[in-house]
Amino acid sequence: MSVMSRLRISLITPSFNHARFIGRTIDSVLSQRGDFELDYRILDGASTDGTLDILRSYGDRVTFVSAPDDGQVDAINRGLKSAEGDVVGWLNSDDVLKPGALQRVATAFREHPQCDWLHGDCDVIDADDREIRRWVSAYKRFFAKRYSYRSLLRRNFISQMTVFWRRRLMDEVGVLDPGLKLAFDYELWLRFAQRSSPLYIPERLASFRWYETSKSGANFSRQFIEDELIARRHGVRSPGARLVKRVNNVLTVAIYNALALARRLRPGRS
């Protein structure tokens, strides 16, 4: 890519029966403006809940394919392999980008030509777009500012929806591991990090939507089990390091369980 050419960003959204949220996701992408070209693709797994009607309503502003797949990782990988951009990322069908996010990404890659991948801050929102769990955002921000590969092995503080990378890095390390179901993004970050450290943008680039029936909300305990196995695969092998990883995950799961219990006991909830 020449210095004067416009950066092309490929963004992938995997989708399946998310009619409740996907319009908000798409709008957050299509509203992005700046000095870049956008290659936006939606890989839908043959939704039956009205998602396709929503996708069709965008006309030629959205490129999508709807067909049976083998799950989220399969959809993302097919999208990543078809991406044509200089920079690549994915946004799940219930998350949203912040205004100006892609321009910040494009500017960062232009100003740092040696940077292979980057990430930024992310807030957590509920099903009604209200910000929640500010402590999660603060926790991740704290460690993002103090990055090291060792720290990343001990805890995953990188928010997936804020991560973008140069295609050359993906060509080198590959796409997501299809054998993983929940912490597949973390495994990819560790492969990236073995090649180079990420650039951190201390600005909110996206919002992660958390609700009790979301994939993360319903499976966080299982996710941390997979998270621990991935860390061992990539370097957490000594008993001390494994203990630190286990304690971090146990404490995090305990906090999530306490928050879920408090939510269920909140007055006014049926």
Image: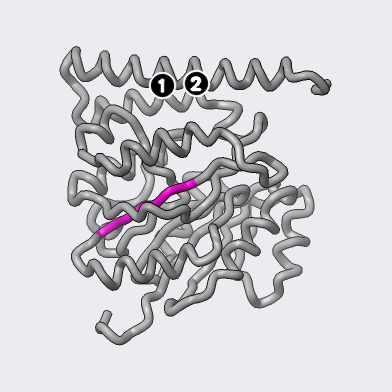
Q: Where is residue 190 in the image (x, y as percent from the top left)?
A: 27, 41
Q: Do the residues labelled 2 and 1 touch (CB within 8 Å)?
A: yes
Residue at 35% x, 51% y: name it: 175
Label 2 SS: helix
- Per the rendered image, the range of residues in magenta is 116-122
- Between residue 183 and residue 106, name the one nearer to us: 106
Q: Where is residue 62 in the image (x, y as percent from the top left)?
A: 62, 70
Q: For mark 1, what is the residue?
A: 225
Q: Which amino acid does label 1 sit on?
A: Ile
| Image quarter of residue 242 | top left
Q: So how many labels did they put on this image?
A: 2
Q: Does residue 77 show up? A: no
Image quarter hosting the N terminus: bottom left
Q: Is residue 203 above or below residue 83?
A: above
Residue at 64% x, 75% y: name it: 61
- Between residue 135 and residue 58, name the one nearer to us: 135
In the displayed structure image, the side of residue 240 where residue 253 appears, left or right: right
Q: Where is residue 43 in the image (x, y as percent from the top left)?
A: 57, 57
In the displayed structure image, the side of residue 267 where residue 151 appears, left or right: left
Q: For mark 2, what is the residue?
A: 221
Label 1 CA crowd tier, 10 Å (few <14, some 14–19, many 20+): some
